[in-house]
Amino acid sequence: MNELPTFRAALGADFEQLAPVLRRHYDLAPGAALTIRGRMRAWSRFPWLRLFLPFMPIPAESVDVTVHNRGVLDHGEVCYEWVRLFSYPGRTLESYTLTRPAPGSACVLDTFNRPANIGMTLGLSVAEGGMALQQENAGPQFAIFGARRLALPSFLHVQTTATERALDAVTSRTEVVIRQRFLGPLFGYEGELEVQN
């Protein structure tokens, strides 16, 4: 079993190239935790998609966002947990992701919701001389039913482009865009987040 934190294991020696704020964000061993906060612009094109993607953000020019990250063990695997809270007037929208090791060089598998029902293989790369970490689709996508994963046909795949860019020792800028081959851009969010602990 690999005992390294998920992102360190996936990136190998490239992990050390990351800017300090990005290393701090992603270097969480089981039991370690980190909270980041900030404001984001959120957008989405098809409100009806929320029936299938309840974690899709509600459009807003500026929404308070808190992200709780933890290193966890899940079925013996070292994983990375994300709990994203988008705070709107009178309502908080939660998005849950568990990132686990995936076969292949510099890849992870993001599983969404609790219990997990969607899985997406993402390739990781260090960019801009270590000032940015990029995540993009790099393999199968799944419907998850308990312990079973059913590979989705390519026409159902979504394309994820996520970049986290270091701004200073405690602040990064996150940009996420989700697209689909036939529907085009579906939703996304962007903004600056600051490490709180």
Image: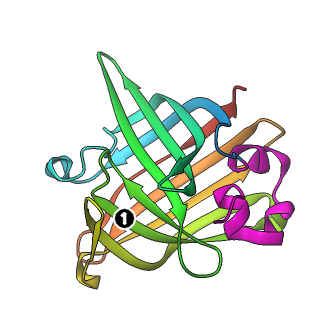
- Queried whether the magenta region covers residue 194, the answer comes back as no
Image location (x, y in percent) of residue 150: 25, 75
- The secondary structure that dominates the magenta segment is helix
Find numbered disc 1 in the image and state the secondary structure of the residue it sits on. Answer: strand
x%, y% of residue 143? 25, 67
Q: Is residue 13 magenta?
A: yes
Residue in view at x 79 percent, y 63 percent: 15
x, y (%) of residue 136? 53, 71
Closer to us: 18 or 182: 18
* Quadrant of res 167: top right
Is residue 180 or residue 152 the one in the foreground?
152
Q: Is residue 22 left or right of residue 48?
A: right
Q: Which residues are magenta?
A: 1-27
Residue 23 placement, left or right of 146: right
Residue 126 relative to residue 151: left or right: right
Q: Which residue in the structure is indicated by mark 1?
A: 119
Q: Is residue 42 left or right of residue 130?
A: left
Q: Residue at (69%, 46%) from the top-left corner?
A: 29
Q: Looking at the picture, which amino acid does disc 1 mark?
A: Gly
